[in-house]
Image (cartoon, helix red, strand yellow):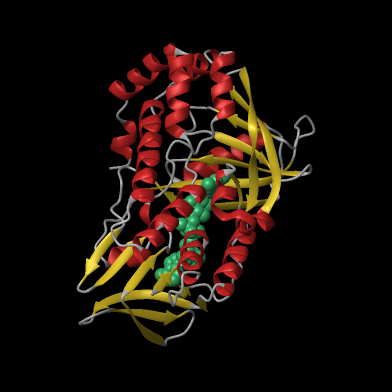
Amino acid sequence: MAVVGGSAAGFFAAYLLAREGVPVRVFEQSERLDAAARTLIVTRRMNDLLGSVGEPCIVNEVRRFELFTDGRAAMVDLAQPDLVIERAKLIRSLAERAQKAGAKVHLGRSFRNLTPLPEKISLELQHTGKNTSEEFAAQTVVASDGALSAVAQAAGWPRPSTVPLVQAIVPLPKDMSPDTVRVWFVPDDTPYFYWLIPESAQRGALGIIGESGSEARKYLEAFLVKRKLDPITFQGARIPVYKRWVPVQKKFGNARVFLAGDAAAQVKVSTVGGIVTGLRGAAGVAKAILNPGSEHELRRLRRELDTHLLIRRALHDFQQDDYSRLVDSLNPMTKRSLSRFSRDEALKVLWRVCISQPRLILMGLRGLLTGRRFDQRNS
Ligand SMILES: Cc1cc2nc3c(=O)[nH]c(=O)nc-3n(C[C@H](O)[C@H](O)[C@H](O)COP(=O)(O)OP(=O)(O)OC[C@H]3O[C@@H](n4cnc5c(N)ncnc54)[C@H](O)[C@@H]3O)c2cc1C
C-alpha cells in the first residue's frame, strides 16, 4: 500500500490502515517533515476524529464570532469552542502516530508517474533535488498529495478549480479578545470574506479567500493598512473548490487508486476549510480499503460537502445590501442555532437557521436563482 503526500489526510489514512496491520509506505516530496506554518481554525469535530493525536497542535480556543459588514455587527457565542491549530504541528503529530502504528515514511520522494503492471501499479518516485528516481509497486495507492495532485492527474481525474487563500500573521489588535474570531463581509473585495483568527493573546492570522492570487494579496495588503496592522509574515496556498462530489476510487488494471483530502477537493466551500473534511475523507477511504463496499462514511461526507456547496451558491453573488440584511436578520433564535451546531454539521445549521428566520430562506433562494458567478468562475 502506498500513500503519496505526507500531510494531514495522508498521515491519517496511513495511521488508520497501519494500525489494522496493512503494510503502508508514505512517500512525501519534502526532504524533511517541516510543513510550512499555517494557522487554521477547526471545529471540535477534529478531536472526535483524532482524539489525543490532535492535542499537540491546538494553540488556542475560540468562543465567539464577531461578524461585520458595512458598519453593522453581530456576535455569535459558541456553545462548544472552536480550536485554533498549527498545521505543521498537526502533521508532525499524525506522522509520529502513523509511524508508531507501523507505517514507513520515505521523505524526498516526489511522485512522477503511474504505470500499470499485471497485478499492481508501479509508482515512479523522483528523489527530490536529484536526477535519480526509484519505482515502487503497490496494489493500492492513496493520493493525498494536495490540490494539484499529480497522482490524480496521472490516474485520469480532472484537475479541480482552486482559489487562493492568503493570510498575514499580525499583532492582535488591542481591542480584540483572544477568544474571539472576527469576520468581515466585503463583497467589493471578495465573494468570500476576511477573517482574523487569534492564535494567542499576542498574535492572529488575518486572511482573505480571493478569486485570483495577485488580487487576493493586493486586497489583503490594503485591508491591513485600513486596520493599521503590520504583517509579521504571510502564509498562503491554493485550495480546491468543491463543485461536485469527486468519486474517490478508480481501478487501474487490477490495482486501485483512492483520493483523500484536498486531492479529492474535500473542502467545505462555504468557508473553504479542508482539515476536518479531509480527515473524514481519509477515514472514509481507509474504511473502503479495509472493508470493500463500505461507503457509509464517504456518503455522509458527500452530503456534508453538497450542503456547503448549496450555501456557497446562495451567498456567492451577495451584494453589500444582502450582507447588511443578512447580519440584521440574525435574531436570538438564529444565533442560538449557529452557536449550538458547528460548521461541520451544515445540514442541521441550515435547517435550524431557516426555521428560526424564514427571511433567510428567501434571500438564499434569490441567491440560488439569480447567482451564476460561482459556477461560471469555477467551471
Ligand atoms: C492560508 C490558508 C488558511 C487556511 N485556513 C484553514 C482553516 O482555517 N481551516 C481549515 O479547515 N482549512 C484551512 N485551510 C485549508 C487547509 O489547510 C487544507 O485544506 C488542508 O491543509 C489540506 O490537507 P491535505 O493533507 O489534503 O493536503 P496538503 O496539506 O496540501 O498536503 C499535500 C502533501 O502532499 C505533498 N505532495 C504534493 N505533491 C507531491 C508529489 N508529487 N509527490 C509526493 N508528495 C507530494 C506535499 O508536499 C504535502 O505534504 C487553509 C489553507 C490556507 C492556504
- The image quarter containing residue 83 is top right
Q: On the rendered image, what quadrant is the N terminus found in? A: bottom left
Residue 318 visible, this orientation: yes
- The image quarter containing residue 56 is bottom right
Residue 148 visible, this orientation: no
Which residue is more in the foreground, 144 or 78? 78
In the rendered structure, the answer to whether residue 217 lies left or right of residue 245 reads right
Rendering coords of residue 221 (x, y %): 60, 41
> Vertical placement of 195 versus 246: above or below?
above
Rendered residue at 74%/45% (across/down)? 203
Rendering coords of residue 277 (x, y %): 46, 48
- The image quarter containing residue 200 is top right
In the rendered structure, the answer to whether residue 307 lies left or right of residue 74 reads left
Rendered residue at 50%/62% (across/down)? 12
Which residue is more in the foreground, 300 or 88? 300
> Vertical placement of 81 versus 17: above or below?
above
Rendering coords of residue 295 (x, y %): 32, 52
Tag count = 0
> Vertical placement of 138 versus 50: above or below?
below
Rendering coords of residue 224 (x, y %): 65, 38
In the rendered structure, the answer to whether residue 15 lies left or right of residue 251 reads right
Rendered residue at 51%/67% (across/down)? 15
Q: On the rendered image, what quadrant is the C terminus found in? A: top left
Which residue is more in the foreground, 61 or 168? 61
